[in-house]
Amino acid sequence: MKVLITGAAGFLGSHIVDQCLAQGVEVRVIVRKSSDLSYLKTLGSKIEYSFGDLTDVAAVNQAAEGIEVIYHSAGRVTDYGNYSDFYSANCTATHNLLEASRIKGVKRFVFISSPSIFADEHDHLNLDESIPYPQRFANYYAKTKALAEQEVLEANCPQLVTCSLRPRGVWGPRDKTGFMPKLMGSLAKGKLKNLAPGKHVLTSLCHVENIANACLAAAISPNVGGQAYFITDSEPLALWGFVDEVARIFQLPPLEGELNPKVLKITIELCELIWKLPLLRDKYSPPISRYAVGLLTQHGTYSIAKARRDFGYNPEVTTQNGIRDLKTWIEGNGGMEGFLRHL
């Protein structure tokens, strides 16, 4: 079997490559020549390269030639940019891959979505897949991921089985700009405060190896056609207790007290007002946003019962083992300074 993996030069995509190779699957990746290929190059001739942009129809069609399964993990995940940037990277790219799948006879399409499409200013506890898409989205990322996911699910048919996986807070080795390095970066500056004083915030995270394993399991299941699935680690975490533990294990400054909710609200409103300016919105990440603060102040836990039932999802990497492996990886790759240099 030969598979095509998008986003392979990035965090999650590179781990999907690893899992496929470990199972003896032939791997082709579609990447831009400007991408950071340092990790992929360590794999030598084990993978085949197809160079091009996912918005280029000809390049995508060429990459899909002879492919049975596509794992689509590429996308724009930043918190800045205009709508056309997000639509092109998340919607147009997905559409091109689906069209190429139909033309080239691809049999399976596994899309990486996100629970962020449901982000709002409410607590989510043990949310399951019955939740409808919202009428309004938190940001451009959430909206375009939702649009892309809907097209993927609607494309399901006997000739092309499609599904969508929604991992929450992906973390682990090789992450350079995601949830965990941002958290550690804030701790390293010695200025991170508890943003939800008095609230026992529960959150779900997903180790990168768990979602990579879920991708491969979903790709061979007879039960996933046209379905979406939340994917997380086994148990939810007490968020701010987890932050304290990360600070202790990685010898970072601890939390510096609490932030008054009224001060936080005023700060967010002021920042969002300023960031309406295109010069800032399109080129720079805001220092704080309603969306980002929501991840740290609202419950966000998700049921994985459907994934367990339909394709036997079993999150084998525990939080404890994942933290241990991350620490080992950081120490072997430039230490904490090297880990945080991309922020």
Image (cartoon, rainbow, N blue to C red):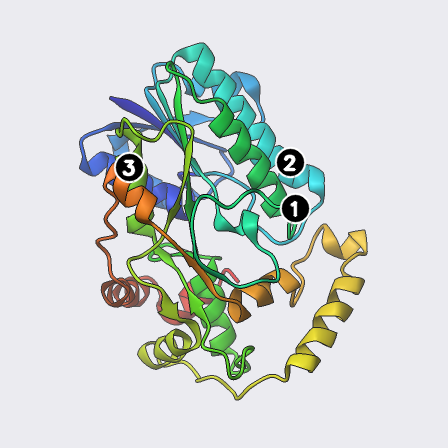
Residue contact between numbered discs 1 and 3, judged by CB atoms under 8 Å: no
Q: Give the side of residue 9 with respect to residue 85, left or right.
A: left
Q: Find the distance from the CA under tag 1 to the CA under tag 2.
A: 8 Å
The image quadrant that residue 339 belongs to is bottom left
Along the viewing direction, whichever of 323 and 341 lies nearer the viewer: 323
Could you say whether the residue bearing mark 1 is in a helix, strand or loop?
helix
The residue type indicated by label 3 comes to: Asp
Q: Find residue 322 and report its horizontal and vertical position in percent.
A: 27, 62
The answer to whether any part of residue 42 appears in the image is no
Residue contact between numbered discs 1 and 2, judged by CB atoms under 8 Å: yes
Label 2: which residue?
Answer: 87
Q: Find residue 121 and report its horizontal and vertical position in percent.
A: 61, 62
Q: Find residue 35 and report its horizontal and vertical position in percent.
A: 48, 40
Residue 13 sits above or below residue 299 on the image:
above
- Which disc, if any, is residue 140? 1
The residue type indicated by label 2 comes to: Tyr
Q: Which residue in the rendered view is the most extreme toward the front?
A: 130
Q: For mark 2, does the 10 Å Cα neighbourhood hold few (<14), some (14 to 19), or many (20 or more) residues?
A: many
The structure residue drawn at horizontal position 42% and vertical position 70%, both measured from the top left corner, is: 337
Q: Find the distance from the CA under tag 1 to the CA under tag 3.
A: 31 Å
Q: Which is more N-terminal, label 2 or label 1? A: 2
- Which disc, if any, is residue 310? 3
The answer to whether any part of residue 56 appears in the image is yes
The structure residue drawn at horizontal position 31% and vertical position 78%, both measured from the top left corner, is: 249
